[in-house]
C-alpha cells in the first residue's frame, strides 16, 4: 500500500434535536398541560489512535465524516434520542491541525487515545420547560444548536526509537532488513526506498526497539529536492539517529566526509532540533574492502570530522557488526528513557 503521511478531511458534528411542541390530550384530563420533551444532543466526532494502522491511505477516497443528528423532542415529555458519535480511526503518531485557525488541535501518540474534533450541538427545549403559573399553555420551544464543522489537516509522524539517515544507496533498507523482519525494497540503484518503513528489532525476550528506514537525502532536500524532504519530519520523534556512510572500493580516493556534511547540512536547514539529536556514525559495506583499507578509511574520516561519538563499521550483506550495533542501541535507549522519566 502506498504510504500517505498527510491528508485533509472535513468533519461535521450532528445538530441538536429541536424541542417538542405538544399538549396532553387524554380522556378525563380536560385541562392537560404542555408535555413537549427536549430534543437530543447531536453526536460528536472523535479521532481514535489505532496501532493497527500505519498510513493515512484510507482517507484518500473518503474525506467527509458526519455524526448523527439528535432526535426531536416528543409528546408525553419524551426526550429525543442523542445522536450517535462518530469515531474515526487514525494511525498512532497523527498530528491534527485546524486548517482555518492553523491551531494544532492534538497529537495522538498512544493506542486508544481519543481526541474530540467536532462537538455535537446542544439539544433544544420543549414547551413543557416554559410552563409557569402565568403561562399554562406555552407554545414556545427552542431549536437544537448546530454541531461544529471544520476542515482538518492530518499529518502522520512515524513513532520510532531509531531513525536511519544517509544518502541514497547507503544501505539503510539493507540494515533494517538485517536487524528486523521488515522487508523494504533493496536494489543496487538510488531511491529504492520511496516511503518510510518501520521494523521492530528484538534484542532479547521483552527487549526491543523500533527502527525507521527513511528515503535517502540529497543536496537541497530541505528545499524540496528529492524524496527525503517530506519525510524529514518523521525523524523528529526518534531518540537516536544512525548516520550511515557507504564505503566503496574507490573510498581511498573519495572523501567520505563529503557524504557526511551533505546530510548534516540538510538537517541543519530543516531544523536545529533535528541536527542536534544524538547521532552515531555507521560505516556500511565493509565487505567490499580489505580489512586494513577499511580501517584506514574510517580512521581518516573520523579524524577529519573530529568526531567524538560512537562509530560502527558493519556489512548489512554479511551481517557483520549488525548484532553488536543493535545490542549497543537498546541499553542506550533504555538509559535515555530512564533519565527522561
Image (spheres, rainbow, N blue to C red):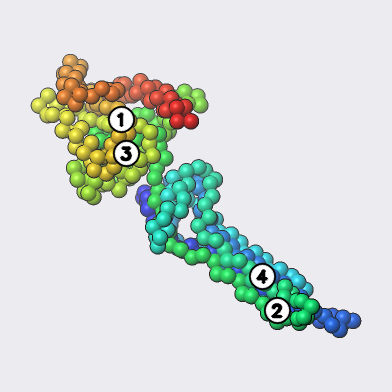
Counting other residues with Cα less than 10 Å from the Cα at mark 1, is it few (<14), some (14-19), or many (20 or more)? many
Residue 192 visible, this orientation: no
Q: Which one is earlier in the sequence, the residue at label 1 or at label 2?
A: 2
Which is nearer the eye, 332 or 195?
332
Counting other residues with Cα less than 10 Å from the Cα at mark 2, is it few (<14), some (14-19), or many (20 or more)? many
- Along the horizontal axis of the image, is 173 left or right of 288? right
Q: What's the residue at 27%, 27% (across, down)?
A: 281
Q: Which residue is mark 1?
A: 279
Secondary structure under tag 3 reads helix
Which is nearer the eye, 203 or 151?
151
Q: How many marks?
A: 4
Q: Position of residue 240 (x, y in %)?
A: 35, 32
Q: What's the residue at 28%, 36% (across, down)?
A: 275
Counting other residues with Cα less than 10 Å from the Cα at mark 4, is it few (<14), some (14-19), or many (20 or more)? many
Q: Which one is earlier in the sequence, the residue at label 2 or at label 4?
A: 2
- Give the CA distance from mark 4 to mark 3: 51 Å
- Give the CA distance from mark 2 to mark 4: 11 Å
Q: What's the residue at 30%, 30% (across, down)?
A: 279
Above/below status of 341 relative to 236? above
Above/below status of 196 relative to 40? above
Q: Which residue is mark 4?
A: 39
Figure quadrant of residue 198: top left
Figure quadrant of residue 152: bottom left
Q: Which residue is mark 3?
A: 273
- Give the CA distance from mark 1 to mark 2: 69 Å
Which is nearer the eye, 323 or 261?
261
Q: Which one is earlier in the sequence, the residue at label 3 or at label 1?
A: 3
Q: Position of residue 104 (x, y in %)?
A: 42, 53
Q: Position of residue 122 (x, y in %)?
A: 61, 66
Q: Which residue is mark 2?
A: 21
- In front: mark 4 or mark 3? 3
Amino acid at each position: 500500500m502506498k504510504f500517505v503521511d498527510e491528508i485533509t478531511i472535513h468533519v461535521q458534528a450532528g445538530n441538536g434535536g429541536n424541542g417538542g411542541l405538544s399538549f396532553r390530550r387524554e380522556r378525563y384530563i380536560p385541562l392537560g398541560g404542555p408535555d413537549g420533551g427536549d430534543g437530543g444532543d447531536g453526536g460528536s466526532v472523535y479521532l481514535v489512535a489505532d496501532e493497527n494502522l500505519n498510513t493515512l491511505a484510507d482517507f484518500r477516497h473518503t474525506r467527509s465524516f458526519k455524526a448523527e443528528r439528535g432526535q426531536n423532542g416528543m409528546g408525553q415529555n419524551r426526550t429525543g434520542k442523542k445522536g450517535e458519535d462518530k469515531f474515526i480511526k487514525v494511525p498512532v503518531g497523527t498530528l491534527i491541525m485546524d486548517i482555518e485557525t492553523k491551531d494544532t488541535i492534538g497529537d495522538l501518540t498512544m493506542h486508544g487515545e481519543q481526541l474530540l474534533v467536532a462537538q455535537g450541538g446542544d439539544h433544544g427545549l420543549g414547551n413543557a420547560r416554559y410552563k409557569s403559573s402565568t403561562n399554562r399553555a406555552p407554545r414556545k420551544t427552542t431549536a437544537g444548536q448546530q454541531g461544529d464543522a471544520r476542515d482538518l489537516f492530518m499529518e502522520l509522524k512515524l513513532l520510532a526509537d531509531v531513525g536511519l539517515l544517509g544518502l541514497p544507496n547507503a544501505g539503510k533498507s539493507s540494515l533494517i532488513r538485517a536487524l528486523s523482519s521488515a522487508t523494504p525494497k533493496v536494489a543496487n540503484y538510488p531511491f529504492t526506498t520511496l516511503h518510510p518503513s518501520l521494523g521492530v528489532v528484538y534484542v532479547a525476550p521483552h527487549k526491543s526497539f523500533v527502527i525507521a528506514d527513511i528515503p535517502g537525502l540529497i543536496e537541497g532536500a530541505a528545499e524540496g529536492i528529492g524524496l527525503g524532504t517530506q519525510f524529514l519530519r518523521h525523524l523528529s520523534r526518534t531518540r537516536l539517529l544512525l548516520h550511515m556512510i557507504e564505503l566503496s572500493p574507490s573510498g581511498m580516493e573519495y572523501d567520505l566526509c563529503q557524504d557526511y556534511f551533505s546530510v548534516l547540512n540538510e538537517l541543519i536547514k530543516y531544523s536545529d532540533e533535528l541536527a542536534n539529536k544524538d547521532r552515531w556514525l555507521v560505516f556500511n559495506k565493509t565487505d567490499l574492502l580489505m580489512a586494513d583499507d577499511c580501517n584506514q578509511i574510517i580512521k581518516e574520516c573520523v579524524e577529519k570530522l573530529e568526531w567524538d561519538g560512537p562509530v560502527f563499521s558493519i556489512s548489512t550483506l554479511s551481517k557483520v557488526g549488525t548484532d553488536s550495533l543493535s545490542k549497543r542501541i537498546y541499553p542506550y535507549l533504555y538509559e535515555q528513557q530512564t533519565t527522561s522519566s
